[in-house]
Structure formats: C-alpha cells, structure tokens
Amino acid sequence: MFSLFKKALGINDDTKKEDSFVKKSKISKELFEEILLESDVHYDLVERLLESLPSKINRIQAFNSLISLFHYDAKEPQENSPFVEMIIGVNGAGKTTTIAKLAHHYKEQNKSVLLGAGDTFRAAAIEQLSRWANRLDVPIIATAQGHDPSAVVYDTIVAAKARGIDRVIIDTAGRLHTQINLAGELQKMVRTANKALTGSPHRKLLILDGTQGVSGANQAKAFDEMVGIDGIIITKLDGTAKGGALLGIADSLKMPIFYIGTGEQPQDLIPFKANTFVNSILDEIFV
C-alpha cells in the first residue's frame, strides 16, 4: 500500500522536509500527538490513543495503540454463488465509480460479474453505470428512470442465478440519508433480494467520502439504522486526503473497512488491511 501518511504530511522524496523529520527508535508522546493531529486525527481520539502510552514511545507501543481501533469482525465473501453485494451511499461519494472498481477487481480474480442499476431515481446514474459496464465488458440489468428499484434487484439476482454469475453488485439510490422515503426503499430492496435468493444481499457496503469527516460518520450511522451496514469503502483518498481520517472512521463506526479508493480509474481500489495501514504510518516515524 502506498503511504497515505507520507502524503498527508507532504513529505516527498524530493522535498527538504525529511531533514527536519528524522526517523527514530523512540519518540516523545508530544511528537506522536503532533504527528497524529497533523494527519487529521481528531483531538479526542488522539488523547485516548495517548493516555496509556509512556512519555517515550517505541514502534510496538505505537502499533498496539493504533491497531486497537480496528478490532471488528469483517464478513468476507463465502461460497455463495452468486455472492450479492448492495452498494449504498449518498450522491457525490463516488458510489458508481466504486462499483466499477469492484467489478474490475473481481474480474481480475477471474470472477464473473453482473451489475444491477438499482438507482432508478436518477437517469444519469443508470447511464453512468451502463457506460462503465460497457467499458469493463460486464453485463448489466437496467431499466428506465422511475421504475421500481426492487424489481431491478429481483431481476438482477434471478438473472445471475440463471447465468451462473459469481458476483452481483447492485447500485442503490444516493439521496440524502435524512429522507424517510429512502429508508423504506432500501429496506424493500433488501427484502426483495432475500426473496430472490435466501440470505442475500450477502454484504451491504457503504461508500464514504474520506474527506467528509464527521459528516461521513453520521451518514454511516443513519444508513446502518436503516438496513444494517456490513462494511465500508472509503473513497477519494488521493494525494490531497489525510490518512488519519481512516482512524477516526474506524473508531467512531466500529465497522470493517474493506477497500480504499485512490483515484478515478478502475484499478484505483486497494483492499484495506489494518496491519498494513498502521505499519505504513509507523514506517514514516520509526527506524
């Protein structure tokens, strides 16, 4: 994994900032606090991460403190065929692009993929997902704007069963989570999926904009109350985003982070591994 933390601090191989930030075997608690705050970890969380640490901190102590935020159970794809995922999130979070990235990721694993254009609220959403399907050469079940999204869910899953598809990825409407009618719509889509294939959707993934901070956490909690979220994909963690946001998200939501998005291309999706992420932070601090 590339170093989100290094980009957050603006430390590049061709800058002179390295001269003023020398890696050490131990650092002071004050310096660790400053580093975390600079990487956009909110103050209350920083204080909790520091409270059990000594005045001089080594790498193992820092690792144990940070990794404690990622103690959750992650639901991995089982042998269900098809394995059905429902993608949830507000408009602008990168939902449709993330669906394309997931499709590309599964194709790289030699899995067959079928998309379901379940966001029938916006014609643009159907068109955008259809373009991605064409670009990636994956089939899609789509209908016209305004049609019942639950019907799309049902037709997509039935088609996947008939065709022997490995992975089904279903888009959903991205209206603001405060709208009551969206909750009813999502709940109906979940019930319909279970009717089409018992136990599905097997995973409900929430797409969160990594630059939104507290707003993203509030979205996640609202959607979780609606339908129960199984995990998160964080988008827009490119060179301008600060990796510390992941620590705050993990702490406030207690939900697994499955992937992070780092760009606009289909390959710009990285499976999230907590150990790798924490070590990428510590690699920039400790020798």
Image (cartoon, rainbow, N blue to C red):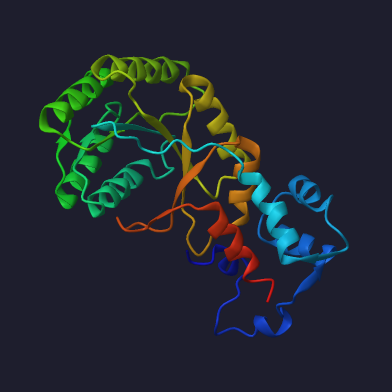
The C terminus sits in image quarter: bottom right
Q: Position of residue 166 (x, y in %)?
A: 22, 38
Residue occupying the point 30% across, 26% down: 121
Q: Position of residue 137 (x, y in %)?
A: 14, 49
Q: How many marks?
A: 0
Image height of 48 relative to 231, above or below: below
Q: Nearer the viewer, residue 270 or 164?
A: 164
Residue occupying the point 65% across, 41% down: 251
Image height of 131 relative to 176, above or below: below
Q: Residue furthest right?
A: 55
Q: Position of residue 118 (x, y in %)?
A: 27, 28
Image height of 107 relative to 8, above or below: above
The answer to whether one can see residue 241 in this image is no
Image height of 25 relative to 146, above or below: below
Residue occupying the point 77% across, 63% down: 32
Residue occupying the point 17% across, 52% down: 135
Q: Position of residue 133 (x, y in %)?
A: 18, 44
Q: Nearer the viewer, residue 104 or 237?
A: 104
The answer to whether one can see residue 192 in this image is yes
Quarter assignment of residue 85:
top left
Quarter assignment of residue 94:
top left
